[in-house]
Image (spheres, rainbow, N blue to C red):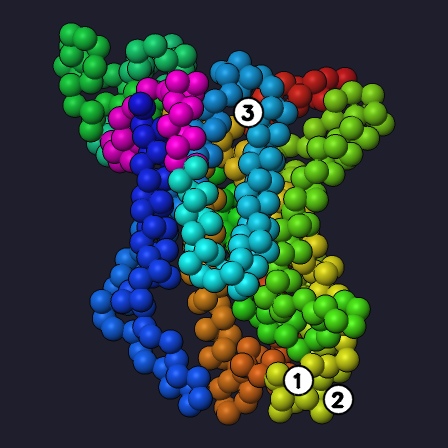
């Protein structure tokens, strides 16, 4: 097996092992604290070994899940034939759309069916069901091995990036001629890339052959890879550096996505009843974000694009940058709606006398939360799918693993920034003995102001994205379209 397949298979095994250890905490009494005494609510704390066992199992699950998300996405894109991958944009778009849709569907199953099993049938069966699913997925990936397209692994990309940086610095005194024919560049054997691009030209010095006798070995390889790199290595680093500004705009959107605690507190104070008997749990309103994302994917593929194609008389397609930009705009609208709804909810709570009772339920339907959840779901579907497709299509195919990991890294950085922003606003707004905007008592706090701050960041982020998108230029495959539009 080759590298990506090995990675997916090994991380599935690792996740299965972590899930198995986690399941043991529900079936082995010694692996968890004893039940609390019912009549006086006395609970004994977990022992050090029990805590270590739990944290160790969760850590293994997290490592495996994080690696699977990036590796499986890249490995799946490898299964598209080269001619399809390069020529059929819709094939790539459909793959990423339905990858995200299936992922969202799995979240729905986890938040509904698995939670129902855990609550009504016990934790042993509740944790045993995903363990069984992990076993099936691990077996399936091995059974399908003969059918997969397996690309040969190449040398470390990270090492190659550093080699280009070091080589371009060491060759900084070289002069770049405006005529490429006057310069000999070091090409990788079998590569279709002959000359480096004209963007970020200072990096081109890393692949200039000064003296073929000294710089190249008899087999055509560089004698010192830290002084001479291939054109491919230079273009790979350029591809990564070029997308950094656009990637940063996605990090800012991840701050909005990371606001997970307040929506639960908000829903908990509102009337969540449907009819006279059924009440939606406050924590379950996040499901509507996932449902909206899946709904958008279905509508986009089965209704929006066909209708647009029929109206224009030719196959219609929205570029990755257009979808990412529209996703940023919808994310901006969603936090504006959150601020507006929270302003109304807070005023009703104060009017009804619930200021000192944050657990009190006000006479306002929680269905008012659906618009903001729907907008957030549409925004995620557009931007997340657009990001993944943008990175995969813009990077060389050898960098597909890096491309598929960028979204996860951005969301992680966004979560850290969200925590920093919340702490900063908390410190600033509670100075002088005043109530913090993000107080634990949401009726005394001002979460509507906090979300207006997020809306301000989102608006500035949209403007930055427009500038970065135009500076980036056309994506791969769009250069011809641009030339056609420029013709009189």
Q: Quadrant of residue 268?
A: bottom right
Quadrant occupied by the C terminus: top right
What residue would you read off at disc 1? Answer: 360
Residue 458 seen by the camera: no
- Find residue 53 and report its horizontal and vertical position in percent: 27, 61
Q: Nearer the viewer, residue 332 or 98?
A: 98
Q: Quadrant of residue 149?
A: top left
Residue found 60% across the figure and 24% down from its top: 91
Q: Nearer the viewer, residue 275 or 239?
A: 275
User: Rounded to the nearest whole Å, what is the CA distance between mark 1 and mark 2?
Assistant: 10 Å
Task: Tell me if residue 198 comes above or below residue 463 in the rendering.
Answer: above
Quadrant occupied by the N terminus: top left
Residue 146 in magenta stretch: yes
User: Horizontal placement of 14 versus 356: left or right?
Assistant: left
User: Any mark on residue 196, and which?
Assistant: none
Q: Which region of the structure is painted magenta? A: 137-165
Disc on the earlier residue, 1 or 3: 1
Q: The residue tagged with tag 1: helix, strand or loop?
A: loop
Q: Badges 1 and 2: C-beta atoms under 8 Å apart?
A: yes
Q: Nearer the viewer, residue 250 or 46?
A: 46
How many numbered dots are placed on residues in this image?
3
Task: Tell me if residue 471 comes above or below residue 448 in the rendering.
Answer: above
Residue lying at the far right of the rendered structure:
311
User: Rounded to the nearest whole Å, what is the CA distance between mark 1 and mark 3?
Assistant: 55 Å
Residue found 49% across the figure and 86% down from its top: 431
- Of discs 1 and 3, which sits in the foreground? 1
Q: The residue tagged with tag 2: helix, strand or loop?
A: loop
Residue found 60% across the figure and 40% down from its top: 101
What residue would you read off at disc 3? Answer: 476
User: Horizontal placement of 68 versus 478: left or right?
Assistant: left
What residue would you read off at disc 2? Answer: 352
């Amino acid at each position: 097996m080759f590298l990506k397949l090995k990675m997916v298979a090994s991380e599935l095994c690792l996740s299965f092992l972590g899930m198995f250890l986690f399941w043991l905490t529900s079936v082995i009494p010694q692996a968890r604290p004893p039940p609390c005494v019912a009549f006086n609510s006395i609970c004994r704390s977990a022992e050090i070994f029990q805590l270590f066992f739990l944290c160790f199992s969760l850590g293994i699950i997290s490592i495996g899940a994080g690696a699977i998300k990036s590796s499986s996405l890249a490995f799946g894109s490898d299964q598209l034939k080269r001619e399809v991958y390069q020529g059929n944009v819709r094939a790539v778009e459909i793959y990423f759309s339905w990858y995200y849709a299936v992922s969202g569907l799995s979240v729905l199953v986890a938040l509904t069916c698995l939670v129902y099993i855990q609550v009504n049938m016990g934790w042993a069966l509740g944790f045993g069901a995903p363990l069984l699913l992990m076993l099936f997925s691990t077996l399936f990936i091995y059974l399908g091995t003969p059918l997969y397209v397996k690309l040969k692994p190449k040398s470390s990309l990270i090492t190659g990036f550093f080699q280009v940086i070091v080589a371009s610095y060491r060759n900084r005194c070289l002069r770049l001629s405006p005529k490429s024919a006057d310069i000999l560049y070091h090409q990788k054997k079998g590569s279709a890339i002959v000359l480096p691009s004209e963007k970020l030209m200072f990096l081109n010095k890393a692949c200039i052959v000064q003296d073929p006798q000294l710089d190249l070995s008899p087999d055509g390889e560089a004698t010192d890879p830290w002084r001479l790199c291939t054109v491919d290595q230079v273009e790979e680093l350029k591809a990564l550096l070029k997308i950094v500004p656009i990637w940063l705009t996605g990090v800012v959107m991840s701050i909005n996505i990371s606001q997970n605690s307040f929506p639960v507190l908000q829903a908990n104070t509102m009337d969540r009843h449907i009819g006279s008997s059924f009440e939606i749990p406050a924590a379950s309103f996040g499901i509507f974000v996932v449902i909206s994302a899946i709904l958008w994917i279905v509508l986009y593929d089965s209704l929006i694009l066909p209708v647009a194609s029929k109206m224009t008389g030719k196959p219609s397609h929205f570029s990755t940058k257009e979808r990412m930009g529209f996703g940023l705009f919808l994310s901006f609208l969603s936090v504006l709606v959150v601020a507006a709804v929270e302003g109304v909810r807070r005023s009703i709570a104060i009017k009804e006398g619930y200021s000192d009772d944050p657990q009190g339920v006000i006479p306002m339907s929680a269905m008012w939360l659906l618009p903001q959840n729907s907008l957030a779901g549409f925004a995620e579907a557009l931007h997340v799918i657009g990001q993944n497709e943008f990175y995969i299509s813009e990077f060389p195919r050898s960098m597909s693993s890096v491309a598929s990991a960028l979204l996860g890294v951005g969301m992680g950085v966004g979560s850290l920034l969200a925590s920093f922003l919340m702490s900063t606003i908390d410190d600033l707004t509670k100075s002088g003995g005043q109530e913090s905007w993000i107080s634990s008592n949401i009726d005394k706090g001002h979460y509507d102001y906090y979300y207006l701050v997020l809306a301000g960041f989102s608006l500035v982020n949209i403007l930055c994205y427009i500038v970065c998108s135009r500076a980036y230029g056309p994506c791969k495959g769009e250069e011809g379209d641009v030339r056609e539009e420029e013709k009189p």
